[in-house]
Image (cartoon, rainbow, N blue to C red):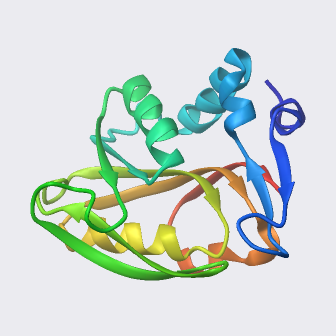
Amino acid sequence: MTADQLKEKIRHIPDFPKPGILFYDVTTLLQDPEGLRGAVDSLTLPFKDQGIELVVGIESRGFIFGSAVADRIGAGFSPVRKPGKLPSTTRKANYSLEYGTDCLEIHDDAVRKGQRVLIVDDLLATGGTARATRDLVKLLGGEVVALAFLIELVALEGRKKLEGERLHTVLKY
């Protein structure tokens, strides 16, 4: 499936979650069997046979794409969540996003020292969420092989917060 075909399956919602933000709603893509398969294929292909042991998915749509990618490449999966959602002891990182600030947590034992990790999310915007996740993985001793995103909002320059990391984005707006 081409990038243009995938883009056709994504709904655009203006002024969500606040005025001035154009939200790219991937739920319409997820509802379409071919769209979902095409998106997961596009996220997975560059990472087959790369020795990735763990995929870390960022709440919440990163769970959907990340777990599918993990299954396809034969890796495990660990979630990064909003505060208070994980039942065991955690590490946390604060970050800035396009429309405010927030915090993420990961279980203390989610990543083994030296483990090869792929971080997956649906969107790279300002890069704050991805950088916080990368920092958490590294704090636990993981080796970040790459970060993969379905969508990149190029004008927001999120790549700058991830300089030195291998990035893969499927769709660019």
Q: Nearer the viewer, residue 76 or 146?
A: 76
Quadrant of the image occupied by residue 103: bottom left
Work out whether 108 lies above or below 64: below
Return the x and y of residue 58 as percentages of the image width and height. 44, 55
**Residue in view at x 80 percent, y 33 percent:** 6
The answer to whether residue 164 is visible is no
The answer to whether residue 36 is visible is yes
Q: Quadrant of the N terminus?
A: top right
Q: Nearer the viewer, residue 10 or 137?
A: 10
Which residue is most to the top?
A: 33
**Residue in view at x 34 percent, y 74 percent:** 135
Q: Nearer the viewer, residue 143 or 82?
A: 82
Work out whether 108 lies above or below 99: above
**Residue in view at x 75 percent, y 73 percent:** 18
Return the x and y of residue 102 as percentages of the image width and height. 46, 78
Q: Nearer the viewer, residue 60 or 161?
A: 60
**Residue in view at x 53 percent, y 77 percent:** 128
Quadrant of the image occupied by residue 163: bottom right
Return the x and y of residue 150 as percentages of the image width and height. 65, 46
Is 112 positioned to the left or the right of 84 in the image? Answer: left
Return the x and y of residue 140 as percentages of the image width and height. 18, 67
Quadrant of the image occupied by residue 167: bottom right
